[in-house]
Image (cartoon, grey):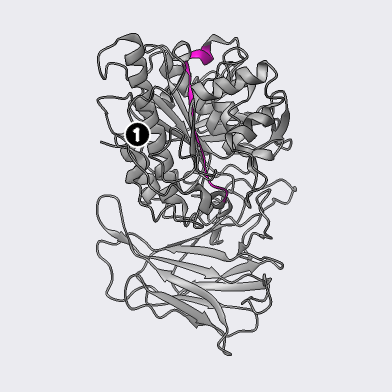
Amino acid sequence: MIGGTDLQAMTAALFAPGLVVLPDAVNPAPQPIPLQHPNHPMMAADDLPDPKTGCIIGVIDDAIPFAHERLRRGAARSRVAALWAMDVAHDPQGPGLDLPAGIELRGARISGWLRDLERGRIATEDGIYRAAGILDMNRQTTHSAAFAAGHGAAVSLLAAGFAQDDPRGADLPLIGVNLPPRILADTTGTLAPGVMIAAVLFVLTRARRLCRQIEAVRGLPANSVRLPVVLNISLGLTAGPRDGSSLVERFLDAVSGFDAPDLGPVRIVLPSGNHRMGRLRADLPPGRFLGWQLPPDDRTVTPLEIWGPPLSALPASPMQVTLQGPGLPPTTTGFTAPGQVARLRDPSGAELARAYYTPTPRVGSGWRECVTLILNPTCPERPGDPWLTAGLWSVAVAPGAQPGDYALSLQRDEVLRGFPREARQSRLHDPAYRDLAPDGFPIPYDPAGSPSAVQRADTINAYATGTTTLRAGAVDRLSEGCVIYNSLIGQRQGGDVMVRVDSAPFDGGMIVRGRGSGSFGIMSGTSLAAPWAARWLAQAMAAGARPADRAAMIAMAPADPRHPDPILPGPPAPAYR
């Protein structure tokens, strides 16, 4: 049963001290916990959702502001059923003893802090975050919860925020997960899959426990309460197989396709991505070199994934990759078997990059070869560290590889606010690629017959190519056209559903709520489209809708663009031209 067991089943290696969480966050001895603990109820009895009209909203992000007034019923009744803060100092007296790291906060306890806030025993909302251990400036970590406006605040409050007197919020409790800062800082996604799966399992186990609490409080038969769950994950990758075969995608498909006897249907919403124009994707035949522009002052490694065409069986001779730098001769990998690591060096023996050969089974049958090429920084962090000359490099799949197009994808490598590192995004370079038309307007789609290997097509979030998740894209409010940054599914589709996010084609951003009650900020991106879609879907499922699959969810989108709901069916009409 997916998500039906306690989370101590997650391996200790995943949350080893110093790997993704600080040492004091690790639970040294995870153990099963009671289904219903008298000292740690999920929610106060009066705050439980209606078993017939309820829907659980799950959010996996960072720094979810659980004390915010938009997550309350009245002044002091929390609508948060549970929150797992993964990288907070572990509390051996708390309810989350089955968790491998961090703490769990439950709604009843949060409501107690809100009552203390209302009575003046806690001076400010900040005091609640400090009392909970979420905000602790003595710990050497990135304090996302201290930001005035943050990604997790915007996303969670778009998905689950309601006015305190809005009756719709009463039956839409929130179960959230604050991911560790190190997971969010690692834009390569290397450590993310296991942590993401643990986060999803937490949402499912706590959703089940909330259903069981409703049954116990209201005297209902066991497993008769089966609230649906709508889970928003406004995260993504710019590199991956993009064929539904990644570990995260296969897990999300399994969760969405599983009919549990003790929980309602689970539907998952993801952003379609923001990197259509980023020059991070290309298709390349063997033997053709493609430019790779490495920026100066990049203190981070630069990863590139090269995915081969589908194969019925692995070839006897692995694919090889050739790298060439400014003023350097080409150097080629020498793989002979799966799982090997190759070190590419210049004529003096200095290491330029490492390459990893990892063939991957496809969903159903067959294989795809994959080489991950990781280049050293262009600016050393410390004296003696390896580094590369910035400028125009080039990469190729060496001749002799299996015929077909090879998909190149650069990982996002940008500065994330609050993380003390200097990241610079590299780009793929083809002289035939054009950003702008002669009239100065951006070219939003790949021109027919373009000789450029660099492309805008198939730039969809690499977590979002499974078969069941709903992909949310962004349109602007003025033209209802797909925004220029919105990544594409295939050649032209921006998302399964589209959400009005930006103000106009060249006026990006929408007003979002900040961490503190009453605070605001301006943000943009499909990360904001996904929680709007999750909110819309949760309200529909609370009203009784039970879409069986992605097609059914898309069919629910209102076709009338004048509809007050910001959801539109995708794809929209092309914009800008």
Give the amino acid type for the residue marked by disc 1 in the picture.
Answer: Ile
Q: What stretch is highlighted in magenta?
A: 168-181
Determine whether 335 is above or below 120 in the image. below
Q: Which residue is drawn at 46% across and 40% down?
A: 92
Q: Which residue is drawn at 56% across and 19% down?
A: 565
Compared across the picture, whether 54 is left or right of 225 comes to right
Which part of the image, by quadrant, shows the N terminus?
Answer: top left
Which part of the image, by quadrant, shows the C terminus?
Answer: top right
Compared across the picture, whether 356 is left or right of 533 comes to left
Can the viewer see residue 21? no
Query: Is 82 included in the stretch rendered in magenta?
Result: no
Determine whether 567 is above or below 293 in the image. above
Q: How many labels does the image show?
A: 1
Query: Is 177 included in the stretch rendered in magenta?
Result: yes
SS at circle 1? loop
Give residue 156's position: percent from left, percent from top.
Answer: 57, 30
Give residue 356's position: percent from left, percent from top.
Answer: 43, 70
Can the viewer see residue 108? yes
| Label 1: few (<14), some (14–19) or many (≥20) C-alpha neighbours in 10 Å | some
Find disc 1 in the rendering and name its residue: 33
Q: In which quarter of the image is residue 371?
A: bottom left
Residue placed most toward the observer, 217 or 184: 217
Q: Which residue is drawn at 63% across and 49% down?
A: 139
Give residue 431's position: percent from left, percent from top.
Answer: 64, 65
Residue placed most toward the observer, 250 or 201: 201
Determine whether 402 is above or below 176 in the image. below
Give residue 31's position: percent from left, percent from top.
Answer: 34, 41
Q: Which residue lies furthest to the bottom in this view?
A: 348
Residue placed most toward the observer, 284 or 10: 10
